Amino acid sequence: MQRTGKFLASALPAALAVALPLGATPAAAAADNTVVGADVIAEVQPLAYNVTAVAIRYQRTIDLEGATVPTSAFDVQATLRGQGTPVVRNRTVTRVYTNDEPERAATGEKGKYLILELATSDAGAAATYFSFAGFLTELYPLAGAYSVTQTADVLDGRGRLELDAPSSPIVNTGVVSPVVDDFSREAYTSPGGTSVRYRFFAPEAYRDKPRAKKLYPLVLALHGVGERGTNNTSQIVGNQLAYAFAEPGRQSTDPSFVIAPQAPAVWAPGTFIWNPADLQQALLDIVDRAVATYPIDPDRVYLTGLSMGSIGSWELLPKVPRKFAAALLVTGQGDPAKVGVLKDLPLWATHSVDDPTVQYSGPISDRALVEAIEAAGGTATWREWAGNLSRAEANAKASEQVQAARAAGSPTLFTTYSRGTTPVNAHWSWVPTYQNDVMLDWLFSHERTGSASCSASVSTSSWDGGFSATVRVTNTGTKPVAGWSVGLSVAGGVSVAKAWPGTLTQDGTSVSIAAPASNSTVQPGKTLTLGFTASGSPAGASGVTLDGAACG
């Protein structure tokens, strides 16, 4: 397992006490077993990013010969800095055992590590805090934050001294964060100068055999407003958004790549951090670069987002309705006029009915968006259940909804979490969503059909103050493209007045035309001819895409 930080080089022996077997007497002190160092273990859990244990490493293997280590032999303190005056918190030790790796385990192994598990209900358990000044999730600096004092010797199962208690505390120098440490730090700058920091997770099967001829899915995960910033970490520890797809249990059934970008820190209430066209194009560029570089199946690229990330997803999807195989969107909102093109996209939205932050009902709510999809000819399956059900109960509810949707031929699903049942805060719909195995199974079950490959040409005819354009797009792939969407770029200041056939959408210099019901499929080898009129200069009318794929 990858670890951050390095071990302390001081020679501090550590010790615990155990009850002597009947009739046993202490033996002479064992040879010194030098402490090499200590790390804290921090884990992404459903409600928080918590410090769950301290791992102390010794120079040689610890052999307790079956002895049970009493938790009372340890005092652990955390000194939390970051919010003004440092706060000292006592941590509760719940288990102590040896292990061969610096990680928690149901049954420890004989090894050089002594694991001190800690209660996550402690007031000082969290590894992050929320800064209301910046409205950001911040990380406590954990290196050097934890000290361990042993108050008794440790004896093995035959009553012999295995480790003696030191006179000085052991202080951690590093942090081990399972799964989080497997996300690499990346950055991308678009040709237009838009920069995005992101984390990138590659499945273990690929890391072990990078040359194997196997394609993997890719998940793009867009965080909420609290996880923006510059540390390139908050977005993967602030909640289980990205973690849910990278954790070992999910990777064992659905090994996949995961991209978790971090939006910039600059933000003002009422603005939507993922919605600007240049940032959305940068996200698409990152996805395209990953697909071109790694063994990623372009027909199994998925989108998920929570809160502000869900809002950004509802804005992005209508521009590229065929880019993603499916989407799982949590507590979002958007423009109902734009989402009719999503009627064939497998999409599951979830939202707490009493959400105090993003409206559950209203003209721009995600509920209204799904109703707009229905009004455009799509079908949706609606259900409601409590957000605090057991995992098994919630899975059963979701399974019933999936079965009902399949029976109805419905690609769109909407789940409401009942009033007063969402854990911690009614806005936190992501807690029951990313804990729901069936919802994630549903996402991975979809594969895009008719993925686009194309060539295109643009011809224009100008007059004083305006122009008309003819766009010809040929499907050069082997599959039909149903429910097509053609996009292109125009020069700044150009305003497109009318387009045919199809539904016109313009966002700055980005123009998209979505298929009408009467001409919604482009067969392989066939050419689609579109036209539009606009004011301004025809210069710069280029960059044609078909369902998000760039045309040659």
Image (spheres, rainbow, N blue to C red):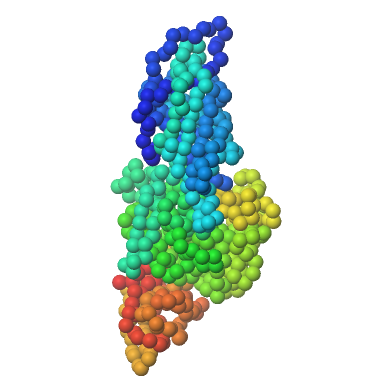
* Image coords of residue 454 (percent x, y): 34, 71
Q: Quadrant of the N terminus?
A: top left
Give me the residue at 59% from left, 58% from top: 350
Examine the rendered structure and indicate whether residue 139 appears above or below residue 192.
above
Q: Residue sitting at 43 percent across and 83 percent down? A: 496
Q: Quadrant of the C terminus?
A: bottom left
Q: Please give left or right for residue 149 compared with residue 546 in the image.
A: right
Residue visible at 35% across and 86% down? 537
**Left or right of 19 in this view: 298:** left
Rendered position, 337 above or below 436: below
Name the residue: 41% across, 28% down. 57
Residue 33 appears anywhere in the view? yes
The single residue placed furthest to the right in the displayed view is 419
Q: Residue lying farthest front?
A: 85
Residue 437 visible here: no
- 156 vs 520, nearest the viewer: 156
Q: Position of residue 453 (x, y in %)?
A: 35, 68
- Give the vertical position of 319 relative to 94 (above or below): below
Query: Considering only vertical position in the picture, is 459 above or below 230?
Result: below
